[in-house]
Amino acid sequence: MLTERQLLILQVIIDDFIESAYPVGSRAISKKDNIPYSAATIRNEMADLEEMGFLEKTHSSSGRVPSERGYRYYVDNLIAPISNQSNTNVIKDFIVDGFFEFEQMVQMSAEVLSELTNYTSIILGPELHEAKLKQLQIVTLSTHTAVAILITNTGHVEHRSFSIPVEINPLDLEKMVNILNDRLYGVPVVRLQEKFNKEITSLMKLYVNNFDKSYDYLKAAFFSESPVKLYIGGKSNMLMQPEFDDVDKIRSFYSMIEKEDEIANLLKRTNEGIRVTIGNENKVDAIKDFSLITTAFQSGDGQMGTIALLGPTRMEYRKVISLLNILSNEMTDALYMWYKNNE
Amino acid sequence: MLTERQLLILQVIIDDFIESAYPVGSRAISKKDNIPYSAATIRNEMADLEEMGFLEKTHSSSGRVPSERGYRYYVDNLIAPISNQSNTNVIKDFIVDGFFEFEQMVQMSAEVLSELTNYTSIILGPELHEAKLKQLQIVTLSTHTAVAILITNTGHVEHRSFSIPVEINPLDLEKMVNILNDRLYGVPVVRLQEKFNKEITSLMKLYVNNFDKSYDYLKAAFFSESPVKLYIGGKSNMLMQPEFDDVDKIRSFYSMIEKEDEIANLLKRTNEGIRVTIGNENKVDAIKDFSLITTAFQSGDGQMGTIALLGPTRMEYRKVISLLNILSNEMTDALYMWYKNNE
DNA sequence: ATTAGCACTCACTAACTAAGAGTGCTAACA
DNA sequence: TGTTAGCACTCTTAGTTAGTGAGTGCTAAT
């Protein structure tokens, strides 16, 4: 167990290092206002803290630097997140003002988040779990081409252009879309394809000649998987961090950040609350030098998406955690309001 | 005027430097197969070429490096663009295969272009100049919210969610959209707003009570300027270039590339053919260390957009110019086909 | 007109030095 | 017995020096 004094010293060291990015020496600590001990005393305590694995040295006669275990302890026990009123307001303002569309809101959130922290923000979703089909449409552009449009009750619009194969009769096309709208209205988007396969195809065969030929086209137009929506904000804000003092680190950071699907997978696992993974706690090699802080936002019963911040292990955990808390709550609220209006 | 031999030597030096990024020495030149002169002769010629401003030294006893003037001469007189068949095929393949939508095609082009060159590709447009209105729609999501959708004959779909103010009667809304569709069908997208203001508003007042209140909402939903579409591909491919050997250069590159509107302005001026601006020929300070190669693609009579590659002044001009030529032609063709089908 | 030869310049690297920040340990102190 | 002053020691960082090599410009010979 750590003594009171050790806790204090550990906290001060980590706070200091997070701010300065330089190894912290005993003399610097002993000078702080809330530290009434001499440098020698601090040195003894630091040696103990190092032995316990909370601190490290960069070389034998250097100051101390937090170890990953140190950060973990710090995050779990030493940060009392103070709600930062001014940040709350910044976030509230832009969410309330600009809330027209999910995607727009999400994208802006990512940017603001990165701007406030100088880390890289990642937002996954909002996924369409809860969104329900409002309307399907096919608008023909010419005899050969058309655009298929899918509208959800959340205001999400997806569209896909395609060319109409000669085998398909335009009248049949219209008929099919009518049937689809009739049968699929209000069905959650995630279950569209399943329902289409199970219930609609058999029905279609009754009304439409030669439905087999149209099947693939309908499916491609309306029911193909849309790619995961991943917003990454402030890729270059991160370059402000002193960790990126060398070209190779920057290169590897950028090549890491481009593996969008790996990152998306990392975020998907998030459940309730805020999760912090530090350095090697991350299961993906590419970010073993980083810390990732994630939290979910949701609407009603289901999870909608994940907000995350990626930064060096020397991260301003306190600030970031409080920011993510605020943002997650605000987004959840905004979504709740939206749904309430739309039910 | 330059002698034959000087032309040859200038060309060889620039080719060599573009490939290696190292200053070129006289000995290295004299060893090349097509150079039958001794190092001393080369040295004399190089001194002359330097005096004329085509070459520079990085320090008093270094090899030679092309000056901006040297690159200019090289681009204007020394490159006979060889059409590279394999590149042509790469480009043709993906344009033909994936051509469903402008935006999709454009985005893919940007990526391929950057992949093939390791420079940063920028594509502006395709602007909607030629696109004509196919259909306007308002789909109500609830009593308070709706999504407005605009569809063009090119398959471009734009949508905007908004909340319906209480002052507007849903029936009126429907009526208004009908009038709009009736009057605006086939009108070029760029002229929608103008036509709406001039001809439609007076008409609306006859049919709709209290039209003044609806005016702003209709305008916001359908006729507000959509932001310029600028695709930037391969921001990090560029880091492969040996020019980016130092952190500050990378930082300033990224902060430059984020000024999207400045870049968009640069590209807008493009007219026919390929334009190369080298280093200080660029009027925007931020890219005075780079070269920018732009060309337009078009459909029918009007210009549709601009394709550009941004790289270090030590750029593979020959390759890039030939690539842009191919891509511009292919995109123009593809657009032409598309229009022919849609008329 | 061309080229071999040579002195000279400058960047780059490695080896060395001095300064400074920080540690661990010992011995003195309250 | 916990705390602290003092000191020798370690290691990084920055600056200096010297040696090497690539390359040039000029001169004289071909």
Image (cartoon, coloured by chain):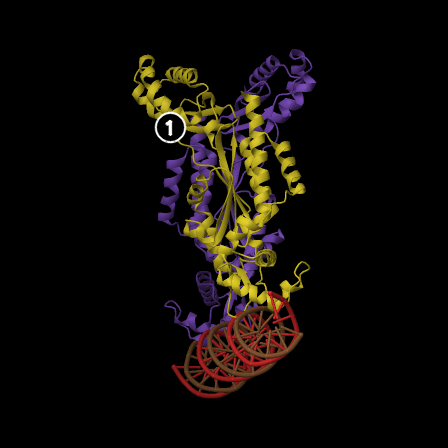
Chain colours: A purple, B yellow, C red, D brown
Q: Position of residue A3 (x, y in %)?
A: 49, 66
Label 1: how many residues lie within 10 Å, few (<14), some (14-19) or many (20+)? few
Name the amino acid type tagged 1: Ala
Foreground pick, A286 / B190: B190
Q: Position of residue B205 (x, y in %)?
A: 31, 16
Task: Please state the horizontal and vertical placement of residue A261, each as a whole percent of the image.
Answer: 60, 43
- Give the vertical position of A166 relative to A50 (above or below): above
Of the pair A112 and B343, the residue shown nearer to us? B343
Instruction: Report whether B306 appears left or right of A36.
Output: right
Can residue A275 be seen in this snapshot? no
Q: Which chain is home to disc 1?
A: B
Residue to which mark 1 is pinned: B220
State the image coordinates of residue A211 (x, y, percent, origin top left): 68, 16
The answer to whether residue A184 shows anywhere in this view is yes
Q: Nearest the camera: A307 or B27?
A: B27
Relative to A244, residue A324 above or below: above
Disc 1 secondary structure class: helix
